[in-house]
Image (spheres, grey):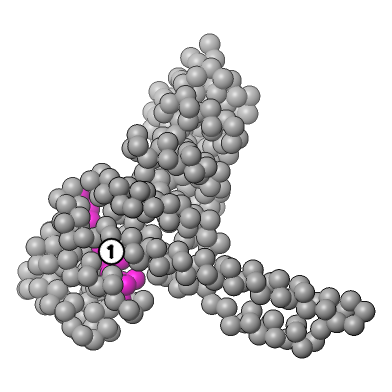
Amino acid sequence: QAASFALSVSAFDSECRTEIRMKEGLRALSNCLASENNRVQEESLMALANCAFDIPCKQTIGALGGMKNGIELLANDEKSVVANACVALSRLVFDFMSGVDFIEAEGVPQLYDVLEKYCKAYDDFDAKRKEVVGMIDTAKTAGEGGGPDPVALKKAEEERDKLEMPDLRLGRAILDACRSCAEQGNVREAMRKHKDSQFFKNIYHLMKHEDEIVSGMACQALANCVYDGEGRPQLLEWGCIEDFVRCLTYKDVDTQLSAARAIGNFAIDSHGRNILREEKAMPPLVKQLQAKDENGKDAIEPRRAAILAIGKCASDRTSAVELCDIGALTQLLSLMDTHWKQLGQVSDDDALLHTATSVL
């Protein structure tokens, strides 16, 4: 356990990762995954995850069976082991062939089971919390003369104090693995086919999670589904536009970026653009042209994604007129003057051109 922890810390350095790989450290860590000690498994998984920042290490870990062992550990009873297994898998699934390995090792159903259990745990927590809130409200007026009942109120407050939200780190790790897997087209297709798209329904369900980080990571995972012609109609049917628009306001830059890209992909066809207008998604998208990161600095990548999304939205006259009415053209002209170098020519050649020509 101590050796695995030491390697885990060392693996943040690229030269150390190379040294670990060249001296059979990855093989030793992969062997540790077969240990019966949960702490050893936990530290070994994190060490492998940190080593997997390098492509040669990713490939070596896969060849040594690290992917398969990590998938098997998703069924572990220890939450910390499952969380670290998800972190490792999120870095090991990085291209088409690693996606093939993930699918062949039954990674999709195993990851689905973990996600399903987490969704159920959160639903149970939410239902219990609503029940306790109801008990408190009732106790406040259950006493004499419509006043509070001290005994009932104390009992309800004790029940409230016992409530414990499902492990947030576990939820974030699961969704990070889902995001990484959904980036690969072959894995994404397998996820969509598993239990009639229930995989993605569960991810969408967690977009409504009260924790902004969990909700944002669900947004990042689900945004990958919008790239597919089969995925877009399903998501529109579920009414997810409102949730993607909400995610534009999150502090995390990656979540802002994913939400803007998803909205842009919905705007590929006229049906999607009509729904975007109905859901009033255009004003928040234009507002994203001024996106900031959590430190208050200009968020260039989300702005670039918003520009491209606006360009797609402006493919028909109705949407283009609405975009101009809410100031999109003015803001794009301003960005051309102030942020041309950071945003590149995309603001000039794409959104501005589409908006102007559509209106004309």
Q: Residue furthest left?
A: 23
Which residue is painted at 34% across and 64% down in the image? 113
Q: Residue furthest bottom?
A: 151
Q: Which one is nearer the viewer's eye here, 20 or 61?
A: 61
Which residue is painted at 53% across and 56% down in the image? 208
Does the image show residue 317? Answer: yes
Residue identifier under label 1 = 110
x, y percent for residue 111: 30, 62
- 106 sits left or right of 177 in the view: left
Q: Residue furthest right?
A: 145
Label 1 sits on a secondary structure element that is: helix
x, y percent for residue 358: 50, 16
Which residue is painted at 27% across and 57% down in the image? 108
x, y percent for residue 207: 49, 54
Q: What residue range appears in magenta?
A: 81-95
Q: Is 90 included in the stretch rendered in magenta?
A: yes
Which residue is painted at 54% across and 21% down in the image? 320
Q: Is residue 247 above or below residue 56?
A: above
Q: Which one is nearer the viewer's eye here, 147 or 311?
A: 147
Q: Is residue 274 above or below residue 178?
A: above
Q: Which amino acid, mark 1?
A: Gln
Q: Which one is nearer the viewer's eye here, 353 or 72?
A: 72
State the image quarter where residue 28 is shown: bottom left
The total of numbered circles placed on residues is 1
Does the image show residue 57? Answer: no
